[in-house]
Amino acid sequence: MTEVDFLNSTRASYDAMALDYDERFRDELAAQTLERAVLAGFAELVRNAGGGPVADVGCGPGRVTAHLHGLGLSVYGIDLSPRMVELARREHPGLRFEEGSMLALDIPDGTLAAVVAWYSTIHIPQERLPDVFAEFHRVLAPGGYALVGFQVGDEQRVYTEAFGHEVSLTFRRWQPDRIAELLAGAGLPVHARTFREPERWEPTPQASLIARKPLPPAEDQTADDQTTGKADQTTGKGDQTTGKADQAAGNPAATS
């Protein structure tokens, strides 16, 4: 299957089942305690790094986009499926959603504080994952974060029917070590990872990785210098305390 065929079939499949997909998974995040914890931790990392624009790539009907917005991020959604984008705009009218492909993001270099791919790389052929992660690296500002969620495994499953609709979709599962390797190869070393066993109807374990685009060496050095300066100030206060103690020892009347 060529890249054009793969993109076209994925787009057409999600267009066909968009309404039923949205209804089936509308409240799913509310039942996923650990996933919400991961998203909350990720949002805090992004905010603590200064914030900025965040792209939820493969956003579907926008439920994770809206959740991250509620966590204080300046986030917008991107999806390959026009029907999914239409649903997201209708259900979350205060947020921005647009069509696009994670293989060629219409985003200037180095402008995002974070990229989210929450179970949206599952249809990408393995040989194209390096291109996806290279695209994430391109659009992230130095110090920006990438969050990737996925099902764990080695196999793939092909679906020709979903929610009563004819589709052509390949679902791919990944090993966390392999995704971490590919992210690092794209210049996004992994900062944190989570893994959990299947719950309820899930057939496989689930994992997520948080990677970060490194800061330039000068900025790293500035951060180190600030830490060293604070340590020096603390040491200086310690010296002052020691001096006062010596004075008191030399003058017993001072303590009486």
Image (cartoon, grey):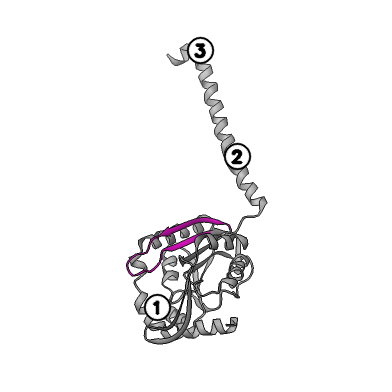
The nearer-to-camera label among 3 and 1 is 1
Q: Nearer the viewer, residue 176 or 117?
A: 176
Q: Nearer the viewer, residue 193 or 63?
A: 193
Q: Callout 1: 10 Å neighbours few (<14), some, many (20+)? A: some
Amino acid found under the numbered disc labelled 2: Thr
| The magenta stretch spans residue 218 | no
Does 13 sit above or below residue 148?
below
Residue occupying image coordinates x 41% and y 64%: 205
The residue where tag 2 is placed is: 228
Residue occupying image coordinates x 60% and y 39%: 229
Range drawn in magenta = 189-210
Question: What label does residue 251 carry, if any?
Answer: 3
Residue 77: x and y in percent read 49, 73
The residue where tag 1 is placed is: 91
Q: Earlier in the sequence, mark 1 or mark 2?
A: 1
Q: Callout 2: 10 Å neighbours few (<14), some, many (20+)? A: few
Quadrant for the N terminus in the image = bottom right
